[in-house]
Image (spheres, helix red, strand yellow):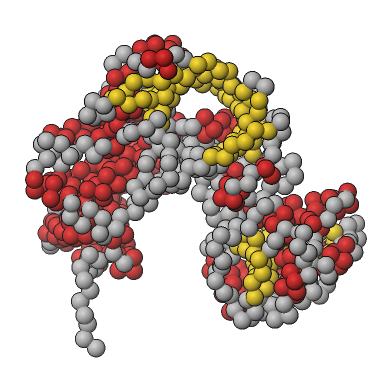
Amino acid sequence: MITVLVANPKGGCGKTTVATHLAAAFAQAGLRTALADADRQGSSLGWLRSRPESAPAIQGLDWHDGPGKAPKQVDRLIIDAPAAMKMKKIEELLRLADVVVVPVLPSGFDEPVTGEFLKQLEALKPIRKSKTAVAIVRNRVQTGTRMAAKLDKFMLGVGHTGAGRLRHRLVYADVAGRGLSVFDLTGKQNEALREDWAPLLRYIENCDPAMPFSAAGE
Amino acid sequence: MVRPNQAGSSTPVETELKLRGDPETLLRLWQALPRAGSAGTPKIKDLENVYYDTADLRLRKRGLAFRIRRDGTRFIQTVKTGDTATSAVMARGEWESEVPSLEPQPDIVDDPAIRAALGLLLPGELRPVFTTRVHREVMEVNGTDSLGRLKVIEAAFDRGEIEAAGAREPLAEIELELLEGPPRALFDLALSLQDIAPTQIETRSKSARGYALATGRKPTWHRAEALELTARMPVDDALAAILGTCLRHWTANELAALDGGDPEGVHQLRVGLRRFRSALSVFGDLLPPAQLEWLKTEAKWVLNALGPARDWDVFQSDLLTPLEAHRPADPDLEVLRAAARERQAAAYSQVREVLSAPRYTRFLLQLGGWLEDRGWHCAELTAEQDTALNQPLLGLATKLQAKRHRKALKLGKGFKKLPTAERHELRIAVKNLRYTTEFFRDLYPAKRARPYLAALRDLQESLGHLNDVAVAEHLLAELTRSAGRGKAAGRLHQAAGRMIGWYDRALLDFEPDMRRTWKSFAATAPFWEKPKKQKA
């Protein structure tokens, strides 16, 4: 099982969008997937409630009172962390995670908060000891804009793996209310949008603790 | 070599043994195999297997092999799990289905476990990594088990090539697979083939070889796999598990040792063998003397043959390099370095010679068969030994560790004034104690074992400096003895004197460290004893 923690104390940076999309991508790939909502607002669970039966199933877990037991027979567990979370709480969730995904918006307000958060993350044991990987994903990027370029520069400075950028599209707002994701839609446009997620998905797949073998020959 | 039938696992595993050699030798063996009646008529096939993976080789990293086999006009897609020689994975699953073309179809895999193992694959992410093309002959041959009963073995003879990114490598191997019954029959058959022509045991799967060719990476070295001993398991099971782990540890490092690019290959191979010998001495009283003698002799033969390679590796990396850092561009040391390299190269040809020797293959086959059917249960085993083998492990483990612990304490008594020769004896006792305690550590709470094992490791490392000097003296004597006369010989003598002086002096510097590690070891309570209750 790979456990992914989606976290950033800055509100509105797209944690729930990223968490629900990751869950949908894994479910679509035929993997047994669970989505744990650690946020009081329960947006991820709300998304799950409106998810149509025709879409690949995702198991919902209510963790707003703290982390529960990870279910057995699950291949991918996505944890949606609450905003403005205390570091102590983060640490609790972090111990469960193989990889932390930090969504960042191209905004002057988000970058300092994210930078501070990353600094705090680095001080935590699982990350310091490289047991847990950190991936930063740039969210709602309008390519070619000044803000996008500024975010790229910020990324260079924080010293963590950038795992791609997600373009700003209205379809994300649309699918959010319907319990869906771009992975559940057809059409050429959505196919192009799904490609935005490829670097992040590949990054997560490489964090599998069940990878005891080197790629070299024996 | 053989995929081990893990104790306690009910999953059926393929039991197979592969021999490699040049195609002509293998053909001779093939023709000499005892064919099993009408089923002994070889069926001939030409097979092409294309292996697929992602660009970052995630399937490989997960121990999977994904291939499509072209068999005439049909295409069979197969996903195999646990496909590595040293894999600790117990279950070895396989999922097969027919597909219309060479286009991989991961989505049709509906076994949840294999699906989970494949993970998420992006559209079009699987691409060919390498291809094997073989001319395969398959037939059934007769084997016998230890009671002389007939066992049917499927034998396959593959000749062909592996191709990856334009590079090609010839492939020739005979694979023996037991259709039913105890695996001993495989070893016996392979041993009888050794009488006709010597071959070597192939430890790699075809996919492992393909990946090696595709990535261009050198064979890697391996640590020992984890031992899974429990306090209540019979001594007999522990003995089989420990010896098996040691055997797999050293054979897993054969390729890295043969390659010689990384000193860790020969080192790990030797560690596996030394642990094996240590296990023989730990359990020696429970084995028939003739068998014990045979195993000790053969293990010692390999170890000794590999010793010089290790010595010259350590001489250069641990002794010469620090000295060169202190005296850069010293012409005397340059002569010494060149001489050491020459010896190292000769030592590595000896490694290759021994690991390819018929005696070595024979040893592995005999040992493999002996381990498979626990050959120590023979007429020479006494009733007392048999009883002891059926006891729960914990009692024996506690006794053996206590014995070695006492011995170390006794040898180290009055450490401060102990002369070098006696400290060497202590060093060896400490080494044996360390192997013994590491075999059994899992029987006790980790929290209690940790401080003791840490103190033991520190002491062993500290006493290791004694050995550095001894090895340096021995190797330098070897170099200077054969140096002859002349300018270079003079330089060599100079460098040798400098090095011995340097490390003799260093030993003085290490004296406080040695005393400290000894004191702290002697003061650490053994973890196999019940902790004494302390008064509040």
Residue B135 shown left or right of residue B254 in the figure: right
Determine the image quadrant of residue B306. top left
> In the image, what residue occupies the spot 64% across and 39% down?
B53
**Residue A53, x across and y down, in percent:** 75, 62
> In the image, what residue occupies the spot 22% across and 65% down?
B528
Q: Please determine whether, in this image, residue B525 is positioned above or below residue B307.
A: below
Closer-to-camera residue (A136/B260): A136
Q: Quadrant of the N terminus of chain B?
A: top left
Q: Please determine whether, in this image, residue A13 is positioned above or below residue B261.
A: below
**Residue A178, x across and y down, in percent:** 83, 67
- For the question of whether residue A99 can be seen, the reply is no
Closer-to-camera residue (B203/A52): A52
Closer-to-camera residue (B279/B29): B29
> In the image, what residue occupies the spot 29% across and 47% down?
B242
> In the image, what residue occupies the spot 70% across and 52% down?
A29
Closer-to-camera residue (A74/A162): A74
